[in-house]
Image (tube, coloured by chain):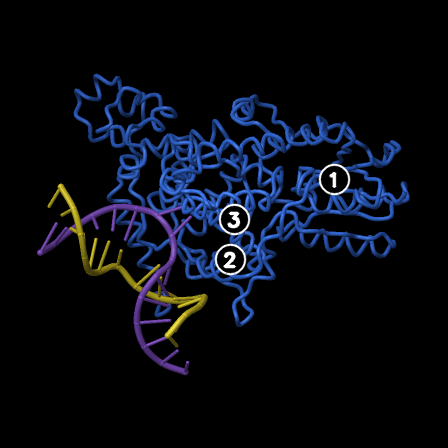
Chain colours: A blue, B purple, C yellow
DNA sequence: CCTGGAGTTGTCCTA
DNA sequence: TTAGGACAACTCCAG
């Protein structure tokens, strides 16, 4: 029987895994994972993602009956050495879409073909391949709605999910060799020295089985009223599937088709809305594919001359959830404590960093990259550029969230804010989101002393809003200067 | 070719 | 109290 390397990357699952099913259908399989910080360079996974990966690999290895082999280093060298030592006939993988992954994989493909080893790549991660969706003039879309409605929904339907391989034969264990340096998952050193990750990991169940359970729970409890409820950080209406999707513990195809099945229900508009959120994930990957400078360059180059502030003390307050703006602090602390932040709160803290503090979106992007368990190069950069106003189809410059109004509107009972900012536990709703405006006796009876046990606001919201509007106005006429 | 409406997630002011 | 308009510029796309 033929032997194939199966190279796991961002597809840490057995079901709806087209490359794995193809490999299993005609070969004995050597399942491999390689931690590749070499090619990733500055885009190497952040700390929270690594903690997730650690547990996801353990779950995957269990499903593979302990047969998963893990390595660390440059995949080209490692894979070729395995292939040569072991007389491998072919290699299978599902495609990745980050620019550094694309160029790495191209090189590996060439290398393997030079050694007469067949390379088979599949789509396991995206509903629509980025190069397949183009405008009539064959250029990429820059606006979400026509991209999604016409380009995606108007095109071919996403493929049906496929079952896990019914038969998965493993090739004999790879002979140990010094140069191959086979590692235990523990040896990848994915967990940080600090115990910071314990709380994060305790907030989540990780792995393919957990991902499917999460989807089932969401369908049972969250999808009804999703469209409205998704805006409220204390409600259970968001899917929280993002980390599972990022690591490929569940495929978007599986989720998509599960949603179509339910389309005769009374909440089909909720389902459509959820599917469009999957569409936003696709759009981010699409933008990264067609604009590979997305992580580095403002897509709107007018922003290259934006008068960003440089005050890194303000950045540190934002990172630590010590801005004195309760809903912002709640969000930043949720991020630190759980590795996650509710979507609406991401927008609020993002708007605050970029507009009220006038700090470059890159600072926010880097912090999220390190702290989020769902950190994803495409989504993270596309979203930060959207918030900052410099992306394609970006938020209009005048959309500056008022964190007081947002709190009152979307966390009216204060459950979310009080959970993550316990200093304000006893503040009445009326002043929970703007304690600096509370009368002294209210602050006193709530046990809040501004500047002592909770910070005074680090910027004046009204002033900083006007400053941001002026800064954005300065871009308007720059071409005449 | 041109024209015009619409575009994920807001806020503030005025009547 | 509430509803409507202003707040850019540009891209997409149907007519």
Q: Which mark is residue A12?
A: none
Cα separation between marks 1 and 3: 27 Å
Determine whether A223 is above or below A141 in the image: above
- Dot 3 or dot 2: first in sequence order is 2
Task: Of the two numbered discs 1 and 3 on the same chain, state the one appearing first in sequence.
Answer: 1
> Pointer 1: what residue?
A165
Give the residue at mark 2.
A153
Q: Picture coordinates of residue A438 (x, y %)?
A: 19, 27
In the rendered image, residue A202, in percent from the top left (x then y), is placed at 54, 23
Measuring 70% from the left and 31% from the top, which residue is drawn there? A188
Kindly give the residue lying farthest to the front in the view shown: A264
As drawn, A153 above or below A201: below
Q: What residue does disc 3 label?
A: A281
Tell me the quadrant of the picture where the C terminus of chain A can be found.
Answer: bottom left
Marks 3 and 2: same chain?
yes
Structural distance between the alpha carbons of marks 3 and 2: 14 Å
Numbered disc 1: what chain?
Answer: A
């Amino acid at each position: 029987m033929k032997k194939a390397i199966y190279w796991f990357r961002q597809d840490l699952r057995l079901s709806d895994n087209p490359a794995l099913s193809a490999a299993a259908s005609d070969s004995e399989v050597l399942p491999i994972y390689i931690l590749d910080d070499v090619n990733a360079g500055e885009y190497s996974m952040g700390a929270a993602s690594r903690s997730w990966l650690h547990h996801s690999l353990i779950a995957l290895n269990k499903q593979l009956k302990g047969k998963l082999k893990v390595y660390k280093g440059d995949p080209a060298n490692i894979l070729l050495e395995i292939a040569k030592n072991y007389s491998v006939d072919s290699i299978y993988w599902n495609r990745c879409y980050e620019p550094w992954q694309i160029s790495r994989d191209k090189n590996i493909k060439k290398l393997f073909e030079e050694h007469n080893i067949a390379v088979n790549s599949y789509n396991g991660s995206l509903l629509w391949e980025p190069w397949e969706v183009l405008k009539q003039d064959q250029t990429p879309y820059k606006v979400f709605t026509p991209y999604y409605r016409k380009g995606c929904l108007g095109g071919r339907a996403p493929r049906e999910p496929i079952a896990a391989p019914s038969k998965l034969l493993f090739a004999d264990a790879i002979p140990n060799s010094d140069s191959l340096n086979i590692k235990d998952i523990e040896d990848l050193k994915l967990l940080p020295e600090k115990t910071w990750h314990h709380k994060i990991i305790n907030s989540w169940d990780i792995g393919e089985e957990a991902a499917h359970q999460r989807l089932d729970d969401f369908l049972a409890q969250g999808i009804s009223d999703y469209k409205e409820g998704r805006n409220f950080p204390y409600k259970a209406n968001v899917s929280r599937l993002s980390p599972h999707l990022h690591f490929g513990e569940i495929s978007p195809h599986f989720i998509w088709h599960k949603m179509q099945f339910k389309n005769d229900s009374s909440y089909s508009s909720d389902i459509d809305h959820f599917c469009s959120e999957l569409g936003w994930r696709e759009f981010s990957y699409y933008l990264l594919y067609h604009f590979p400078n997305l992580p580095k360059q403002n897509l709107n180059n007018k922003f290259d001359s934006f008068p960003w502030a440089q005050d890194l003390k303000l950045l540190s307050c934002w990172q630590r959830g010590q801005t004195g703006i309760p809903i912002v602090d709640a969000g930043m602390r949720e991020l630190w404590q759980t590795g996650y932040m509710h979507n609406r709160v991401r927008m609020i803290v993002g708007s605050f960093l970029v507009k009220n503090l006038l700090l470059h979106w890159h600072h926010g992007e880097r912090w999220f990259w390190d702290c989020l368990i769902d950190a994803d190069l495409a989504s993270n950069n596309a979203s930060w550029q959207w918030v900052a106003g410099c992306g394609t189809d970006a938020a209009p410059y005048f959309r500056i969230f008022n964190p007081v109004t947002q709190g009152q509107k979307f966390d009216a009972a204060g459950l979310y804010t009080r959970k993550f900012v316990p200093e304000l536990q006893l503040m009445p709703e009326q002043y929970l989101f703007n304690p600096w405006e509370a009368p002294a006796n209210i602050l006193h009876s709530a046990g809040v002393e501004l500047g002592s046990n909770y910070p005074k606001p680090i910027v004046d919201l009204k002033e900083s809003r006007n400053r941001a509007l002026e800064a954005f106005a300065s871009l308007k006429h720059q071409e005449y200067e």
